[in-house]
Image (spheres, rainbow, N blue to C red):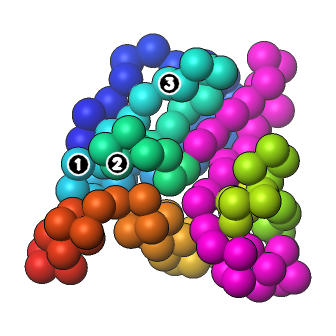
Amino acid sequence: MAFESEHVLVSETAFAVRDRIREICAGLPEAEEKIDGFGHTTFRVRDKSFVMMGEGEKGWGGNCNIKSDKETQQVLIQKGPYIRAPYIGQHGWVQVANKEIRDWDEFRELIIEAYLRAAPKKLVQAYHQQ
């Protein structure tokens, strides 16, 4: 997995979440970390985002947005702490405040599912053959 050296995250909470996401993505074929044009830390596969992180300059901990489908989105919103992601929620994305992430096993599964939604079929097959 390739990592960008420059970052726009500022809080310890955001760095800790980013590092855990890096660990999860390390096992995903062709997953990359990049800073997008809006300054968000993104995790992508073949230039398709599946996780996006952002944080204000004051370092309040930030949010993590995860690609989902609309059915999963509704379940996650109902149980919390996930909400419909601003601007991209109509496409199924969910958002969680970094400091609200409690169930890392569930979070890991959501990231892998997001990757599998964004990845081309050959990479999905490669992942399942690992």
At 78% from the left edge and 17% from the top edge, which residue is drawn? Answer: 57
Badge 3 or badge 2: first in the primary sequence = 3
Label 3 Cα crowd, 10 Å radius (few <14 / some 14-19 / many 20+): some
- 38 vs 119, left or right, is right
In terms of sequence position, does the residue under pointer 3 or pointer 1 come before the other? Answer: 1
Does the segment drawn in magenta span residue 67?
A: yes
Is the Cβ of the residue at disc 3 closer than 8 Å to that at disc 2?
no
Count of marks, rendered view: 3
- Give how far across and how far down residue 116 sits, in percent: 38, 68
Between circles 3 and 2, the one closer to the viewer is 2
Query: Can residue 22 be found in the magenta stretch?
Result: no
Query: For residue 45, which numbered disc appears in the image?
Result: 2
Q: Identify the residue shown where x is 54% and y is 71%.
A: 110
The residue under the point 21% across, 56% down is 29
Q: Quadrant of residue 75?
A: bottom right
What residue does disc 1 label? 30
User: Residue 21, position in %: x, y?
Assistant: 46, 52
Is residue 130 found left or right of 22 in the rendered image?
A: left
Q: Amino acid at mark 3?
A: Ile
Q: Quadrant of residue 90?
A: bottom right
Determine whether 39 is above or below 41 in the image: above
Q: Look at label 2 and name its amino acid.
A: Val
Q: Element under label 3?
A: strand
Rounded to the nearest whole Å, what is the CA distance between mark 2 and mark 1? 6 Å
Q: Are marks 2 and 1 in contact (CB under 8 Å)?
A: yes
The quadrant the C terminus occupies is bottom left
Q: Which mark is residue 35?
A: 3
Residue, x 54% and y 32% (percent of image)? 41
